[in-house]
Structure formats: structure tokens, C-alpha cells
Image (cartoon, rainbow, N blue to C red):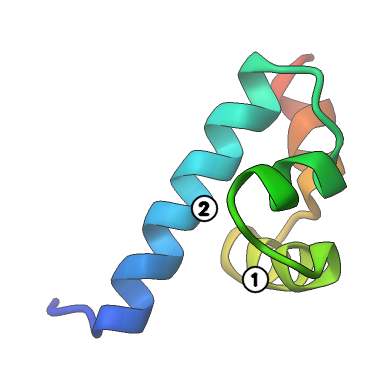
Amino acid sequence: MKQSAQQHIQQKLIDCVKELLTNTELNVSQIAYHLGIEHPQSLHKVFKNKRKLSPLEYRTNFKK
């Protein structure tokens, strides 16, 4: 299935966020700013839409 440019960018963003959530202690706001996202709630919305979990839920489930 061919992805649009926006879908491809969102997938790469989600991959970066997952990496930072699992390998750092940065909070979601810090991760957003680190990735150049001005509004952390935008990151939260995209992540939850794509992963069906909030970033914090993902971190909690990953560390179990």
C-alpha cells in the first residue's frame, strides 16, 4: 500500500517518539520540543491516533 507524504512523515515521527519514549526519561513535552513540535498536544493527538495509546500509555506498557 502506497503512503502519502503526510502518512510517511507521521510514521517516521511516531517511530522517533517510540524510540525516545523507550530509551529516555524525557517527558512528552520535552520529546515534542526535541523533535521541533511547538505544541505537545499535537504530538499527543497524532500518536494516539496512530498507535491507539497515548504516549504515556505506550511508555507504561513498554516498560512492563
Q: Position of residue 30 (x, y in %)?
A: 80, 40
Q: Residues within 10 Å of mark 2 (few under 14, many from 20)?
A: some
Q: Nearer the viewer, residue 28 or 22?
A: 28
Q: Give me the residue at 71% from left, 64% from top.
A: 43
Identify the residue position indicated by label 2 in the image: 14
Q: Position of residue 4 (x, y in %)?
A: 24, 85
Q: Residues within 10 Å of mark 1 (few under 14, many from 20)?
A: some
Q: Toward which corner of the image does residue 59 lie, by quadrant?
A: top right
Q: What amino acid is at disc 2?
A: Ile
Q: Is residue 18 left or right of residue 56?
A: left
Q: Are marks 2 and 1 in contact (CB under 8 Å)?
A: yes
**Rendered-image quadrant of the N terminus:** bottom left
Q: Which mark is residue 46?
A: 1
Q: What amino acid is at disc 1?
A: Val
Q: Secondary structure at mark 2?
A: helix
Q: Residue furthest left?
A: 2
